[in-house]
Amino acid sequence: MCLALCACTQVDLGATPRAATGGTGDDAPVEPHGSGGNTASPSNGGSAAAAEPEPIDATLTVDVGQRFQVLEGFGASVAWYGEWLTTHPRKRELYELMFRDLGLDILRLRNNYRDTGGNFDPVAAELVSEATSSLGHAPRVLLTSWSPPARLKANGKTECSGESSCTLKQENGSFLYSDFAEYWRQALHAYAGLGVNPTWISIQNEPDFIPPSWEGCRFDATEGTYPSYQNALSAVRAGLERDQLRVGMLGPEVTGLTGQKLQSYAASLDLDLLDGIASHLYEGQSWRIPDSYLPEMRAVATQMGAKPIFQTEFSVPGGEGAFETAWLIRNSLVELGASAYLHWDLIWTGNDGLIGIEDPRQIASWQTARGYKVQDTYYSLKHFAAFTEPGDERVAAVSAEQALEPVAFRSEDGRRLTVVALNTGQQTYRLRIDVPNVSVQGGDLYRTSAAERCQAVGSVPAGQSFTMPPRSIATVVFSNR
């Protein structure tokens, strides 16, 4: 097998965002290195600048013979503010950024069916159509319910205000499981009429949580004060089978992994009803130390690894944590054994979302020239999503350097190998990737750094190394030309 090389490195948290094209402006690219070291550059005054510390030589070894989970893909959600996108004057370039450029595989949508037919969710219909056009194929869709219609809720509304009655309604002392299942059956038929045919559904987003000011519906692991998630899941599955609706089911989509939340729901579930185990990663400020998740991730991987594991929602607020986001993606893939990783907000307002968009009804008040801003977290996800495909299989990747955290994927046909490595430390490495028993040739280097965003900056000859600054990422793609 003859392979070629390309790579990327990641953003420092304090860096100024660049355009979505990854342009560097006047910043000079950092070239890949061979066996030689860096040379100090002269200062503006003409005298020699202080020599930087010599990078540490390191090797990352990939063993394509050791195989793990099959990748379902990477994705993100459009659950709110979709109408800002579909009416945005620059939506065409936004769609290219969201789908083709990012390499999105999975689009997570909110179930907006509310007992009405016709074009009840024009946003979802347009998103799927535009994603198909941009990607060249239909996206995989995960349709998640935040709340059933108000008529099925004990509080009589879809939104929660922290009240205990934000759950499924009861009649004659019994929760309305069959009505909930009928809502889902009708919703899937209605979405099919819009050209939206989900690959998977999740019957309830975060059933363990009652929101303070948005849609929700509480389900517990077992029936008591609240309805049983298992009973609801069983009713929905039975309804879909009666109609021969072929769609996968993911769950239980709990808020996080601490406190055995996922295991407590799974213990009461008939796991044969699920096609994948899904959860989120919200754990307060734990994201600031991504390795703090490792005990819970490893426990879930050990106990739930018989089925594909999906991380279906996570983000940090206000545009923070670009490097930590990438680190959590890597840990989810390697330590949790996740087959899919979904960022929360593909689009949102302000500094949130992978792309922050501005209200198209208020163009005169826009704070950006184009009415949107590509956030640093966009590139964190892109390092993984743009260089892999569903069906890739994770293979072993290790380094003797503790600060280097790798993950690698091999394509189904064996013609492409994607390696992502994080430098989580404070020293610079000169990294060489070794793939024993595989013949490789030179390739292309793409990088994100303080001055770059996933930009092509040069070629890497076979067998030579490239520099990874502190808190950086390299994405390396070997492929036949």
Image (spheres, helix red, strand yellow):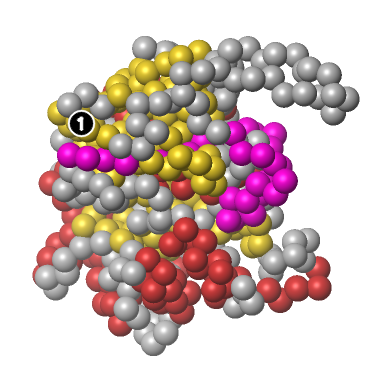
Q: Nearer the viewer, residue 3 or 265?
A: 3
- 183 inside magenta stretch: no
Bounds of the magenta span? 1-30
Q: Secondary structure at mark 1?
A: loop
Residue 207 located left or right of residue 275: right
Q: Tell me where residue 14 appears, x and y as whole percent.
A: 69, 34
Neighbor class of circle 1 (other Cα within 10 Å; few <14, some 14-19, many 20+) is few
Q: Tell me where residue 62 appears, x and y as whole percent.
A: 27, 26
Q: Is residue 71 visible?
A: no
**How many tags in the picture?**
1
Residue drawn 35% across and 56% down?
Answer: 105
Q: Tell me where residue 94 appears, x and y as whole percent.
A: 55, 66
- 13 inside magenta stretch: yes
Residue drawn 81% across and 24% down?
Answer: 43
Going by the numbered disc 1, the residue's amino acid type is Val
- The outermost residue toward the right is 45
Q: Quadrant of residue 4?
A: top left
Residue drawn 47% across and 58% down?
Answer: 101
Q: Nearer the viewer, residue 60 or 183?
A: 60
| Secondary structure that dominates the magenta span | loop
Q: Tell me where residue 246 appears, x and y as whole percent.
A: 16, 66
Quarter of the figure with the N terminus: top left
Position above or below: 37 against 119: above
Q: Nearer the viewer, residue 284 or 6?
A: 6
Residue 288 located left or right of residue 313: right
Q: Quadrant of residue 328?
A: top left
Position above or below: 61 against 315: above
What residue is shown with label 1? 438
Q: Is residue 95 visible?
A: yes
Residue drawn 46% across and 14% down?
Answer: 57
